[in-house]
Image (tube, grey):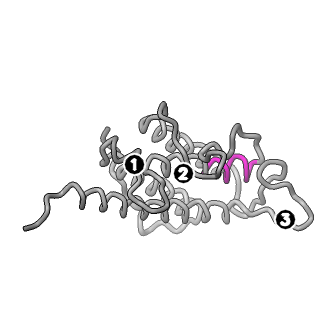
Amino acid sequence: MRPAAAYEPSPQLSDPQELLLGYLDYLRTMVTAKIAEMPESELRTSRLPSGWSPLELLKHLVYMERRWLRWGFLGEPVPEPHGDKDASGRWHVGPEETVTELIAALHAGGEQTRAIVTRKPLAADSATGGRFTGGEQEQTPSLGWILFHVLQEYARHAGHLDIVHELGEATSRPAVQ
């Protein structure tokens, strides 16, 4: 599996909607590239005290974007909005789930996000009835706020993958004598 090259949006781009979408595309591609560089055994193993594996993080990103855009902003009913978590709230991936399927789901979610965002202004408020109930104390976030939140989640988790990748390389190198 060879991922597409990742490029930041043009430095001449100033439209906030296209900047947010462009950086989300960029980060999805970066995450895909980091995952693709790891052997299957590393994808399902944790090197961190928190215990998550790279494949669990990938699945989390798929569900996180769906929770914020489809269930959150649109208010759509989505099956298993927290399907990336087990009963204890910990990220999980079943043995039948593959890296190919999860990467495809990540990019399909990105296409759905782009379709949602290109139909609405960034100032549009989220619908009620999905993630947001519209209760008396609840303020529903704007589409712009949601996109920025999703972007920071991708950036933070891409950095986590950098560290995990580096830890994997360090243990696979022969010791220096």
Q: Amino acid at mark 1?
A: Thr
Q: Which residue is mark 2?
A: 61
User: Foreground: 20 or 140?
Assistant: 140
Q: Quadrant of the C terminus?
A: bottom left
Cβ atoms at labels 2 and 1 below 8 Å apart: no
User: Which is nearer the N-term, disc 2 or disc 1?
Assistant: 1
Q: Is residue 95 above or below residue 67?
A: above
Q: Amino acid at mark 2?
A: Leu
Q: Is the magenta region chiefly helix, strand or loop? A: helix
Q: Residue at x 42, y 36 (%)?
A: 100
Q: How many labels were placed on the picture?
A: 3
Q: Residues within 10 Å of mark 3 (few under 14, many from 20)?
A: few
Q: Which residue is mark 1?
A: 45
Residue 70 painted magenta: yes
| Residue 171 image offset from top left, x and y in percent | 24, 58
Q: Which residue is mark 3?
A: 138
User: Which is nearer the N-term, disc 3 or disc 1?
Assistant: 1
Q: CA distance from mark 3 to mark 1?
A: 39 Å
Q: Residues within 10 Å of mark 2 (few under 14, many from 20)?
A: many
